[in-house]
């Protein structure tokens, strides 16, 4: 099952199947996601907060470290997730927050998870119904059993790079080069990383077509590692890869914000990948 679902397919699915809808609208540095949800959301959708339910406290593990298993499990139970019911996740259209939740659910063993391509704006643009207010879902029985997806920490990433493994940094190209850094306190990229901007995987407020994704990700192979600023955008790039059949992509959850938390780790700037110094 490919991870993306379009508006028409979702509308048809909702007519015949009991689906858990999760709204995870979020924008970096803002707290307006819940307000937007209260104004209007897909009928029956429950809101999930990325900063408090899908992330732990920022620190040495990065700006959006993965939460404790029990925190995530409780959040999904509150939202009504059960092992035998399909989940469809959507956000404000970027795919970032929805992909974070897709990655976490599938990593925890819930395989039947899809992301609405284009998110809430695509649903509204198609003239589909919405409703305001808070939805309190029937409490679910979700069990978090993480470990179904490959991840790597900073030390494991260094080993991966030293044996010639590929690392793709999906931040904007100027941030990769160390220019215009306004989010993290150190500019640049991990030595050995190649630039693969997330914008090249999208088109018009949604994920790009399969044909475009195949072309853009033609050099990506199973076992390659993806990173970004704090692990969120990288999960969306992994989703894009799986949409065109590239399995086994590895997430570096802490990404750049964790890498630079240790000042002894090397940093590269400019358009060249660079390489780790000889240990």
Image (tube, helix red, strand yellow):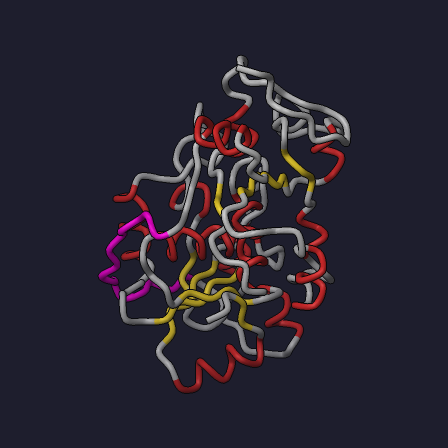
Please name whichever residue, 274 or 30, is drawn nearer the observer in this view of the structure. Answer: 274
Q: Which residue lies at the image location 36% right of the left edge and 39% below the top edge? A: 67
Q: Quadrant of residue 215?
A: bottom right
Residue 38 inside the magenta-drawn segment: no
Please name whichever residue, 133 or 83, is drawn nearer the observer in this view of the structure. Answer: 83
Where residue 147 appears, x then y in whole percent?
A: 32, 48
Q: Which residue lies at the image location 72% right of the left edge and 63% below the top edge? A: 212
Q: Is residue 191 above or below residue 35?
A: above
Where residue 224 appears, x then y in whole percent?
A: 54, 45
Compared across the picture, whether 131 is left or right of 147 comes to right
Q: Which residue lies at the image location 51% right of the left edge and 64% below the top edge? A: 115
Count of numbered marks: 0
Where residue 278 appears, x then y in whole percent?
A: 57, 16
Q: Is residue 151 above or below residue 241?
A: above
Compared across the picture, whether 174 is left or right of 166 comes to right
Please name whichever residue, 255 or 142, is drawn nearer the observer in this view of the structure. Answer: 255
Q: Which residue lies at the image location 67% right of the left edge and 38% below the top edge? A: 194
Where residue 111 appears, x then y in whole percent?
A: 36, 64
- Magenta residue span: 134-148
Q: Main secondary structure of the magenta part?
A: loop
Q: Is residue 182 above or below residue 220?
A: above
Residue 142 inside the magenta-drawn segment: yes
């Amino acid at each position: 099952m490919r991870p993306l679902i379009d508006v028409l397919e979702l509308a048809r699915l909702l007519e015949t199947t009991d689906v858990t809808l999760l709204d995870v609208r979020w924008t970096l540095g803002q707290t307006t996601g819940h307000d937007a949800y209260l104004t209007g959301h897909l009928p029956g959708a429950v809101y999930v907060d990325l900063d408090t339910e899908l992330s732990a406290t920022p620190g040495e593990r990065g700006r959006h470290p993965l939460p404790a298993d029990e925190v995530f499990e409780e959040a999904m139970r509150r939202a009504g997730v059960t092992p035998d019911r399909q989940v469809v996740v959507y956000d404000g259209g970027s795919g970032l927050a929805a992909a974070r939740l897709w990655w976490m659910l599938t990593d925890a063993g819930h395989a039947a998870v899809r992301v609405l391509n284009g998110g809430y704006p695509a649903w509204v643009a198609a003239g589909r119904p919405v409703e305001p207010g808070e939805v309190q879902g029937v409490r679910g029985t979700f069990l978090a059993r993480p470990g179904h997806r490959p991840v790597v920490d900073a030390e494991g990433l260094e080993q991966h790079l030293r044996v010639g493994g590929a690392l793709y940094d999906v931040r904007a190209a100027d941030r990769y080069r160390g220019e215009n850094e306004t989010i993290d306190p150190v500019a640049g990229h991990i030595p050995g990383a190649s630039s693969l901007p997330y914008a090249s995987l999208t088109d018009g407020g949604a994920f790009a077509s399969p044909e475009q994704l195949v072309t853009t990700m033609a050099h990506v192979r199973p076992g390659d590692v993806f990173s970004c600023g704090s692990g969120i955008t990288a999960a969306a790039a992994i989703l894009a890869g799986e949409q065109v059949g590239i399995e086994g992509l590895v997430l570096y959850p802490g990404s750049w914000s964790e890498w630079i938390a240790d000042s002894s780790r090397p940093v590269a700037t400019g358009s060249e990948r660079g390489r780790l110094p000889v240990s």
